[in-house]
Amino acid sequence: MQTQLKLTAALRANDDNKALELEAAANAQGRGHAREWANGLAEIASVVEFSRGLVESIVIDAATFVAHADEIFQRAPIRYVVLKDVGDHLAAVLGLPHLAQLVWLSFGGDRTHPIGDSGMQKLAACGSLENLRVLDITFQSVTRRGLEALCASPVLRSLVCVELAGNEFSSPIEEIDTDWASGRDVAESLRLPELGQELEAKYGPLAWLHPVTRLAHRPPRFEEL
């Protein structure tokens, strides 16, 4: 656990070299203690991931998440959830008060049950998501209408990163070119696409439209949040 605590500290300090060294050690320790550290969650979720020696991230189908939410959040300080097979369970998911604990929520792994514009509108109105920092809605059949619901949301004001690829609009998110030789960003190429400009003109500043400017890593590392 001490190694994972040191890893989190290195990531938050943007010490990438130290983080790489500690990550290898933490992963090795995790393989030896995974079942013990999972505290029973390995039998509920399809994937569990550790941070600071505790389960903070799970991949789980929506029906199981709803049915076992109390147990899940009692067993571990879950902050990151990837939902699968959402289907008709979205309303039940969004009714869970446990969502207030999350900083990262992903629907991006579920292309067979996209949430669409109606789901996006429900997300945007879900008061329990006020602490959410990262939202992944890749390939969720969201159109401009759903995107504007996100922008207008009075709840989702803490977002710093939104993954939008594969939906029915061009990317509104800040872009920058990378030098092929050094791998570094080319500062003078920084730009906000026209759609992003339109959205901010209508809804005011949106932090998640500016990941290049605001974030050390894109997308952010979980430990940074």
Image (tube, grey):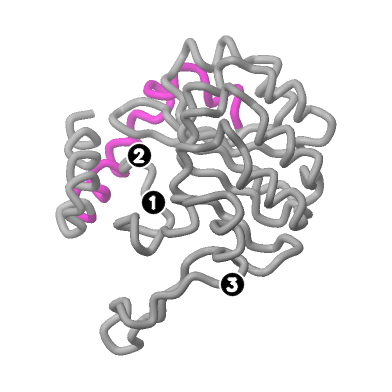
> Mark 3 sits on what residue?
194
The circle drawn on residue 150 is none
Residue stretch in magenta: 20-45
**Within the magenta stretch, is there residue 21?**
yes
Going by the numbered disc 2, the residue's amino acid type is Leu
Q: Is residue 38 above or below residue 141?
A: above
Q: Which residue is mark 1?
A: 220
Q: Is residue 99 above or below residue 50?
A: above
> In the image, what residue occupies the spot 77% across and 25% down?
91
Please tell me whether mark 1 sits on a helix, a strand or a loop. loop
Q: Is residue 189 magenta?
A: no
Give the main secondary structure of the magenta stretch: helix
Rendered-image quadrant of the N terminus: top left
Q: Quadrant of the C terminus?
A: top left
Element under disc 3:
helix
Q: How far across and down, in percent of the image, does residue 119 sit?
A: 76, 38
Residue drawn at 64 percent across, 49 percent down: 137
